[in-house]
């Protein structure tokens, strides 16, 4: 399957293509499905960083469709990683449900470039949801001793079974999805002025509209410098 005009654009942006092979599949819940892959040389070619993601290519009624997924527990020496798929209607979820060991899928690496802040922050302030939960866990794992507050938006009862990793110095604040993310945005806006001190780092990854709104609020209203903010929309609301 060709990648169409999107693939051509990614090639111009120096995207690198790889073929992944399914090693195992596991249904974690009615809402979450996990696949383990052999990476086709991806990790050795690109390296690994926290919150790393790749673009997977799916067949959508004969047309190419790409979506980004975070790598879970990438192991460059073994050439393996895992991906978690939040299940809903659509070609990506349909493919994940049906995938079996030996199946292959094409992937492009382009756009994932997060670097941990240096020096490390005194506190993490994180905004995420089920789509970005693997990336949230990756970030928390990369800074294991850093206190964190995580606002986690939920849209399904099963989401509560897969909260980001908590701990004695970490707080996970569940926020139900309401009014297209408006409740999450307002909840975070109310809390940020008190928490966003000079040692804090703000990381936002939820739906694109909410991500942009909160990033703009932090920059323009609270004066947060760009080096202490990372914001990336993980999906677009229909």
Image (tube, grey):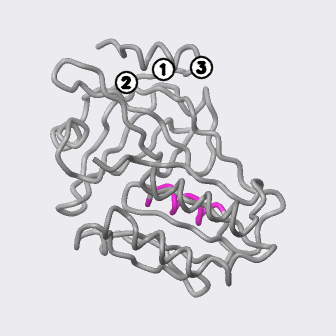
Secondary structure predominantly adopted by residues drawn in magenta:
helix
Q: Residue at x 81, y 73 (%)?
A: 198
Query: Which is nearer the N-term, disc 2 or disc 3?
Result: 3
- Dot in front, 1 or 3: 3
Residue 30 falls left or right of residue 145: left
Mark 3 closeness class: few <14, some 14–19, many ≥20 residues within 10 Å: few
Residue 59: x percent and y percent? Answer: 23, 24
Name of the residue lying farthest toward the front: 221
| Residue topped by disc 3 | 13
Q: Is residue 118 visible?
A: yes
Circle 3 sits in a helix, a strand or a loop, which is it?
A: loop
Residue 117: x percent and y percent? Answer: 76, 57
| Residue topped by disc 1 | 17
Separation of marks 2 and 3 at Cα, in angstroms: 17 Å
Q: Is residue 100 visible?
A: no
| Residue topped by disc 2 | 106
Q: Are marks 1 and 2 in contact (CB under 8 Å)?
A: yes
**Quarter placement of the N terminus:** top left
Residue range in magenta is: 133-142
Q: Are marks 1 and 3 in contact (CB under 8 Å)?
A: no
Separation of marks 1 and 3 at Cα, in angstroms: 12 Å
Name of the residue lying farthest toward the right: 119
Please name whichever residue, 55 or 211, is drawn nearer the observer in this view of the structure. 211
- Residue 38 drawn above or below residue 8: below
- Dot in front, 2 or 3: 3
Asked if the magenta segment contains residue 137, the reply would be: yes
- Residue 198 drawn above or below residue 207: below
Separation of marks 1 and 2 at Cα, in angstroms: 7 Å
Q: Are marks 2 and 3 in contact (CB under 8 Å)?
A: no
- Residue 72 drawn above or below residue 155: above
Residue 37: x percent and y percent? Answer: 38, 38
């Amino acid at each position: 399957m060709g990648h169409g005009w999107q693939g051509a654009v990614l090639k111009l942006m120096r995207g690198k293509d790889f073929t992944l092979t399914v090693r195992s599949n596991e249904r974690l819940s009615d809402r979450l499905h996990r696949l383990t892959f052999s990476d086709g040389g991806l990790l050795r070619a690109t390296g690994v960083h926290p919150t790393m993601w790749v673009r997977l290519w799916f067949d959508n009624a004969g047309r190419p469709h790409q979506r980004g997924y975070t790598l879970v527990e990438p192991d460059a020496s073994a050439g393996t990683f895992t991906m978690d798929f939040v299940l809903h209607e659509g070609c990506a979820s349909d493919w994940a449900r049906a995938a079996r060991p030996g199946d292959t899928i094409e992937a492009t690496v382009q756009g994932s470039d997060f670097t941990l802040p240096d020096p490390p922050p005194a506190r993490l302030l994180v905004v995420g949801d089920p789509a970005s939960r693997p990336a949230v866990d990756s970030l928390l794992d990369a800074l294991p001793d850093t206190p964190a507050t995580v606002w986690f938006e939920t849209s399904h009862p099963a989401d509560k079974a897969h909260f980001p990793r908590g701990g004695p110095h970490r707080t996970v604040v569940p926020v139900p999805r309401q009014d297209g993310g408006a409740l999450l945005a307002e909840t975070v806006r109310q809390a940020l002025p008190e928490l966003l001190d000079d040692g804090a780092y703000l990381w936002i990854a939820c739906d694109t509209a909410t991500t942009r709104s909160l990033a703009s609020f932090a920059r323009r209203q609270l004066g947060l410098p760009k080096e202490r903010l990372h914001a990336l929309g993980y999906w677009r609301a229909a």
